[in-house]
Image (tube, rainbow, N blue to C red):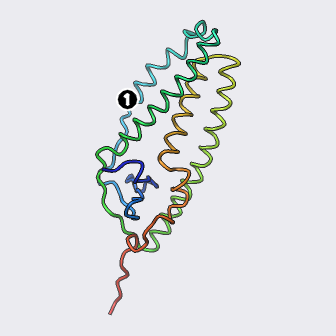
Amino acid sequence: MYSNKNMVGLTSQNGISIYLDLVEGDLKKDKMPRKVSQVKIFLAIILTLPIMRRNYFQVVLANTSIRISLFLISIIVAIFLGILVNKRGYQGLEVETVRFSRAEFKDFQESVRKNNQVLLILGFVLVGLFFICSCLYFVYPHIFSLFVVAFSVWSIYTLATNKMFTVKRHFEKYLNFDKVYLEDVLDT
């Protein structure tokens, strides 16, 4: 059984996710590409828009103790949802070993490095967004800023527990290079 403790998602090439197996030290690819359900995302957005558009919670958020309680509850719920996402993300994962030629591995490394730069920038943006929206929430309480705080906490938690800021940045240290490269065929 795979989990976020022994597998790290590195990149996606041609729609196929490639993982680093921390136990065996080799690269694995997903046998069956997964698709995100667009309908679920669309329904979640449609259901939350009326709540954020109207000021249902303005009267409730005027009370300071309720405001602080909602802030803490939203952070706890965001972390709980991050735990659920981590468990479901690796559930039913079927992988097979990937082998690269040296040229393909160089392209793969470059792809992972580009993804790492984007993740690092995203991490800084999410932390900044968390602090800015937290301050805004306590100065001018609004449900949208509370939602953004919860989303940024969920994103930071999910990225951190999937080792996106640590192992992924230095994935070459964890690789067993004998298992990564294809055997060089010598013409005789």
Q: Residue 180 lies in what quarter of the image?
A: bottom left
The amino acid type of the residue labelled 1 equals Lys
Q: Residue 169 lies in what quarter of the image?
A: bottom right
x and y, in percent, of residue 135 in the image = 69, 25
Task: Give the total of numbered labels.
Answer: 1
x and y, in percent, of residue 94 in the image = 29, 52
Which residue is pictured at 60% across the width and 44% down the height? 123
Which residue is pictured at 63% across the width and 9% down the height? 63
Relative to 19, 50 lies left or right: right
x and y, in percent, of residue 162 in the image = 47, 47
Q: Residue 146 lies in what quarter of the image?
A: top right
Position above or below: 110 against 91: below
Position above or below: 46 against 123: above
Element at label 1: helix
Query: In the orientation shown, which residue stands out farthest toward the top?
Result: 59
Q: Write down the residue under mark 1.
A: 40
Q: Nearer the viewer, residue 146 or 102?
A: 146
Relative to 117, 12 lies left or right: left
Q: Nearer the viewer, residue 7 or 55?
A: 7
Mark 1: few, some, or many residues within 10 Å (few <14, many ≥20)? few
Relative to 27, 142 lies left or right: right
Which residue is pictured at 41% across the width and 41% down the height? 86
Q: Which of 10 and 162 is in front in this view?
A: 162
Image quarter where the C terminus lies is bottom left
x and y, in percent, of residue 164 in the image = 52, 50
